[in-house]
């Protein structure tokens, strides 16, 4: 089925609303949704399985422990997100990063977010903004990729997504981290003027 998408401005409004209604509960709720909107090579299940030890803030990278593609996969963080993560207390390496804190009824502190936890808050934010029919996956990854198609080529997007099993696109292993960051940077801004072209060496 086709997923309904939103434009970048609406996506940002939803993320900000998620932050508004959840920051006092757990800041990582809005961080998770922001990451899904920025790093479109991340699937929701992969995001939730990230552990503290998978995050390398010195290199600005997150190792995806068990990607669906069954091959090594990293998320190359933007500088602003490295600083955001540095501002948070760190836990032991084997703890899930997206975990519940203390004082939340019905869940145990330290447990990983459930599969539908981010989705639940995304829906609540959409309801408050009177936005209908946009699910979490459609409103984050799908909306981001659709927006990027205005100023990035399909090949560039496919390389950065790291989801293809097509042999013709295995060159993404040779894409430099800064090139990937440049593409992810475009998920945060409206580029209607000069288009920056990454170096995609084959």
Image: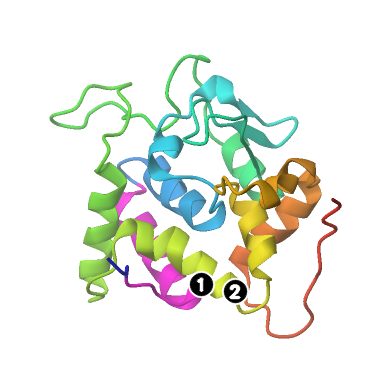
Give percent across and percent down for residue 20. 35, 58
- The number of discs equals 2
Task: Give the main secondary structure, helix, strand or loop, of the magenta stretch.
Answer: helix
Q: Position of residue 164 (x, y in %)?
A: 57, 49
Question: Does the magenta-highlighted stretch encompass residue 5?
Answer: yes
The quarter of the picture where residue 19 lies is bottom left
Would you say residue 185 is visible in this rendering? Answer: no
For image coordinates 72% across by 52% down, the residue present is: 181
Question: Where is residue 145 drawn, in percent x and y?
Answer: 53, 66
Q: Is residue 128 above or below residue 44?
A: below
* Relative to 162, residue 37 above or below: below
Q: Give the residue displayed 57% in from the left and 45% down from the top.
A: 165
Q: Please provide the residue range marked out in magenta.
A: 4-23
Colour scheme in use:
rainbow
Q: Nearer the viewer, residue 88 or 167?
A: 167
Instruction: Answer with the quarter of the image where residue 96 lies.
Output: top left
User: How many other residues sit within 10 Å of disc 2, few (<14), some (14-19) or many (≥20)?
Assistant: few
Looking at the image, which residue is at 60% across and 64% down?
187
Q: Quadrant of the N terminus?
A: bottom left
Where does label 2 land, which residue? 149
Taking the magenta stretch, the answer to whether it contains residue 65 is: no
Disc 2 on helix, strand or loop?
Answer: loop
Extreme front residue here?
Answer: 167
In the rendered image, residue 99, in percent from the top left (x then y), is placed at 36, 29
Q: Which residue is mark 1?
A: 146
Q: Real-space Cα distance between discs 1 and 2?
A: 5 Å
Q: Neighbour class for label 1 at 10 Å: few (<14), some, many (≥20)?
A: some
Q: Is residue 70 above or below residue 188?
A: above
Give SS at disc 1: helix
Q: Quadrant of residue 18?
A: bottom left
> Which of the two residues, 14 or 20, is positioned nearer the viewer here?
14
Q: Is mark 1 in CB contact (under 8 Å) with mark 2?
A: yes
């Amino acid at each position: 089925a086709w997923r309904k998408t939103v434009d970048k401005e609406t996506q940002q409004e939803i993320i900000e609303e998620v932050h508004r209604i959840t920051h006092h509960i757990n800041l990582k709720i809005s961080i998770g949704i922001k990451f899904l909107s920025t790093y479109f090579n991340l699937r929701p299940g992969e995001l939730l399985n990230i552990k503290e030890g998978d995050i390398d803030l010195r290199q600005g990278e997150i190792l995806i422990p068990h990607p669906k593609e069954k091959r090594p996969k990293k998320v190359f963080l933007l500088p602003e997100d490295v600083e955001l993560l540095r501002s948070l207390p760190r836990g032991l390496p084997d703890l899930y990063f997206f975990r519940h804190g203390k004082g939340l009824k019905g869940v145990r502190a330290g447990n990983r977010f459930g599969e539908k936890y981010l989705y639940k808050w995304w829906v609540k934010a959409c309801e408050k903004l009177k936005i209908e029919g946009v699910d979490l996956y459609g409103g984050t990854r799908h909306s981001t990729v659709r927006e990027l198609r205005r100023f990035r080529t399909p090949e560039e997007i496919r390389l950065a997504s790291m989801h293809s099993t097509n042999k013709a696109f295995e060159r993404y292993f040779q894409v430099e981290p800064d090139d990937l960051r440049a593409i992810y940077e475009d998920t945060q801004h409206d580029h209607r003027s000069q288009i920056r072209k990454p170096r995609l060496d084959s």
